[in-house]
Image (cartoon, rainbow, N blue to C red):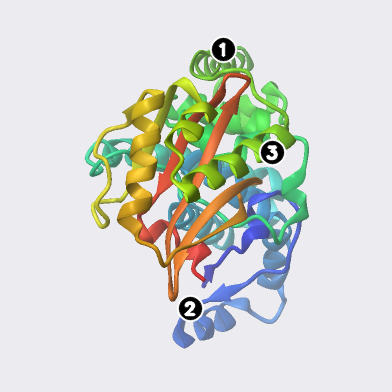
Amino acid sequence: MRWCPDSSDIGGGSSSPAWSGTEATRRAVMVGRGEDGTLIGALGVFGGVRPRLFGIAYRMLGSVAEAEDVVQEAWLRWQQTDRSQVRDPIGFLVTTTSRLALNAATSARARRELYPGPWLPEPVDTTADPTLQAERNESLELAVLLLLERLTPAERAVYVLREAFDYPFRRIGEILDVSEAYARQLGRRARTHLAQQRRDRVAHADHDRLLRAFLAAARSGELTRLEELLAETATSYADGGGIVRAAQVPIVGRDNVARYILGLMRKFGHDLALEIVESNGQAAILVSRPGTTVALVTIEASPAGIERVLVILNPQKLALFQR
């Protein structure tokens, strides 16, 4: 039996479980339930905490498919555990998922060193889940997820559990099997590394204003106007995944980024639809043509202007935004 998360899995609220799998798998689970209903109870507990588990795994891995695999493995371990000996089921599941995600992040790091060109996190459509508009939404933003890749897996785990889910360091230490003092140290390292890579943030309304102005300038082909919106040291990352042709290295500098974006627009052609959608809790630009989604574009902004432009072209990462 495999868990298939919807957008509500990323926030931390509860939702009804959605399932997929072969008929043989479903029959096997039915047989495994037994007559005392213990697996039904296990399903209830797991379903209630599933959104949090997926949210932890997704933030740590930046990939829906990899997060699904972690949650699936956590379910299998929960199913096979002597649950009568578990005093804190939610704690057990959070600990199991966090450790599985930590292991997965370690192996994913090695794989991504061989990725063709810049790797960007897989975006998710968050419009259907109001719980994602919570105060601790920053850790879901694509630009933040990209920066988290530069941390060690352990630093990333502490950052996610602390900043996204507000776990105390004592509990984080228990989850990761380290001391509270070391968990605090990892948390300080994570915040320091991220602060060194980020400019001051702008208000949500200013971010949306800049994105809409960016969209208008890209549509009209106004190079000067586009340059005015970009910070002097703006950087653009494009992820084609080796499937779609994209820049193999980040594009750096206001002039270079502006010309690259307008070049992409010319490459895409004139039959494009560009619309504002919500991705990872922020406004983003969805680029599509009849029958297919071409790209998703997000920005990170500071008082100096647009600092980062993330262009996701890999069709495998755009599945949730297919029109």
Q: How many labels does the image show?
A: 3
Q: Residue 72: image x %, image y %?
A: 50, 60
User: What is the spatial separation of the Cα atoms under label 2 and label 1, in whole angstroms?
Assistant: 42 Å
Residue for point 25% across, 43% down? 115
- The three-letter code of the residue at mark 2 reads Gly
Q: Name the residue under label 3.
A: 137
Mark closer to the chain start, 2 or 1:
2
The correct choice, above or below, for 296 with respect to 41 in the image is above
Query: Helix, strand, or loop for circle 3?
Result: loop
- Label 1–label 3 contact, CB within 8 A: no
User: What is the spatial separation of the Cα atoms under label 1 and label 3, in whole angstroms?
Assistant: 23 Å
- Is any atom of residue 53 visible in this view? yes
Q: Residue 185 carries which label?
A: 1
Residue for point 45% across, 60% down? 318
- The three-letter code of the residue at mark 3 reads Asn
Residue for point 24% across, 39% down? 248
User: What is the spatial separation of the Cα atoms under label 3 and label 2, in whole angstroms?
Assistant: 32 Å
Q: Residue 221: image x %, image y %?
A: 43, 45
Query: Helix, strand, or loop for circle 1?
Result: helix
